[in-house]
Image (cartoon, rainbow, N blue to C red):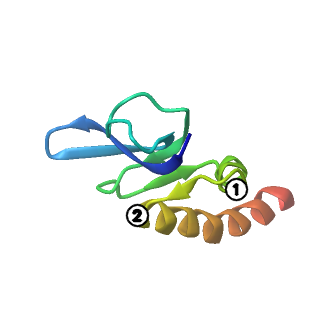
Amino acid sequence: MALKIRLSRIGATHNPIYHVVVAEARSRRDGAAVEILGTYTPRSKKEQLSLDVARAEYWLSKGALPTDTAKGLIKKARKNAPAAEPAAAEA
């Protein structure tokens, strides 16, 4: 079973929202997913990306291959995650 970390589109016309999912490589774009890791809302002014980095790391360790876009989103989430944790710890 070859797994991929990729985007699955939800949302309305001209207002895309994507789920970052782990899915079988041969399944359809919006087909059944093994796990939903988070969401990406490219048109949002506030929080565009909400991603569970720990679960993404888990699936990467199990051999799931990210698409180019998903790889960039995971990289962005890793960069933002450490900055958010110390602020929460101080409060």
Residue 68 spot, x, y in % from top left:
42, 67
Q: Which amino acid does label 1 sit on?
A: Glu
Q: How crowded is mark 1: few (under 14 residues within 10 Å), some or many (20 or more)?
A: few
Is residue 47 visible from the viewing direction of this image?
no
Quadrant occupied by the C terminus: bottom right
From the viewer's perspective, is 18 left or right of 76? Answer: left
Residue 37 spot, x, y in % from top left:
57, 43
Tag count = 2
Element marked by disc 1: helix
Q: How far apart are marks 2 and 1 (CA)?
A: 16 Å
Pick whichever, 18 or 44, lies toward us.
18
Residue most extreme to the top? 32
Give the residue drawn at x 27%, y 36%: 11
Give the residue drawn at x 36%, y 30%: 31
Pick whichever, 58 or 20, lies toward us.
58
Element marked by disc 2: helix
Give the residue drawn at x 33%, y 57%: 42
Q: Earlier in the sequence, mark 2 or mark 1?
A: 1
Which residue is under mark 1? 57
From the viewer's perspective, is 91 left or right of 4? Answer: right
Asked where in the image residue 75 lies, by quadrant, the reply is bottom right
Residue 4 spot, x, y in % from top left:
50, 50
Quadrant occupied by the N terminus: top right
Which residue is under mark 2? 69
Pick whichever, 26 or 67, lies toward us.
26
Indicate whether 41 appears above or below 1: below
Residue most extreme to the left? 13
